[in-house]
Amino acid sequence: MTDYPILPDLATLGSRRRPGRPITKVEFIVAHDTGNPGASARAHARWYRNDPNPPANRVSSAHLFVDDLNIVETVPALTEAPEQALHVLYSVTTDNALFGFDANRAAIGVEYCYGGNIAADAAYDRFVFVLARLCKVFSLDPATRITGHHVLDPVRKTDPVGGLAASGRTYDGLLTDVAARFAAVGGNPAAIGSQAVRVGAARATVNLNRRREPTGAAVRTGGFRPGDGVTVAEVVPGQRVMGNDRWCRLPEGDFCWSGGLVLA
């Protein structure tokens, strides 16, 4: 597997795109797509430089842009001193409910470039690589600490689902591929699902199926949405998903995969 370089092309320090505020601790990662089919990673970096101070009500930024040729860092992320970027509305509070933090203050935002002349396979491989690399650098569990913009802001946003679909991929497939890549970039496979739930209160971090048995092939009996409360009656072995074979038996007798839950 290729280990891709990260190319710095930083936005102007002290601008609205890059105010320079530090992230005290990176808690999770938000996957985005640019919504601009055919626009490259370098083009977006150039846009940030040429328009450093858009109106305050329209400002946005992200840490990394990924296309088929480059992974471009526009706000410091893969460094000992990562900085904040403005990639999720503060008024949207799903990030606080799921992770306990504002995404803009505690998460790395990664933008997927797609469409036009961008080669989908090469862009997707770089996207998977950089998400896995971020998990390794910041000791994040790839099963629970990556989310999509569409999860955090479902009324307004569909990214990265739309960009991935344009490339023949899915969001669920992305999460599976990142977990598989995690070990290849030096992450500890034992860390996948390491934020293990225990008997008692938990909450869902992803769209999560309930099953009759602890396997993805079992009959679906319902589901949970991100943020839903879940009561765990017992943690049992089951089908290994993204490196994690721990499933939760619910009080009603059905099961859900523990990798989609965190402690409440």
Image (cartoon, rainbow, N blue to C red):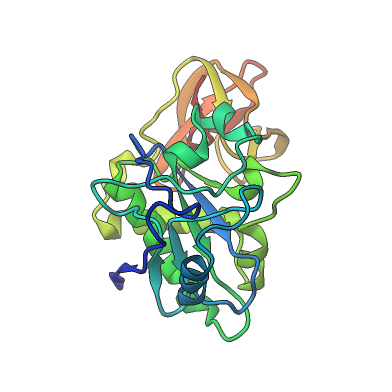
Q: Is residue 239 visible?
A: no
Which residue lies most toward the top here? Answer: 200
Image point (56%, 40%), residue name: 215
Image point (58%, 73%), residue name: 114
* Nearer to me, 218 or 160: 160
Image point (45%, 37%), residue name: 105
* Nearer to me, 156 or 184: 156
Above or below residue 122? Residue 106 is above
* Nearer to me, 44 or 214: 44
* Nearer to me, 237 or 258: 258
Q: Is residue 216 visible?
A: yes
Residue 185 position, x and y percent, is: 27, 59
Image point (54%, 21%), residue name: 202
Where, by quadrant of the figure, is residue 253 drawn? top right
Residue 45 position, x and y percent, is: 46, 69
The answer to whether residue 210 is left or right of residue 182 is right
Residue 104 position, x and y percent, is: 50, 41
The answer to whether residue 241 is left or right of residue 221 is left
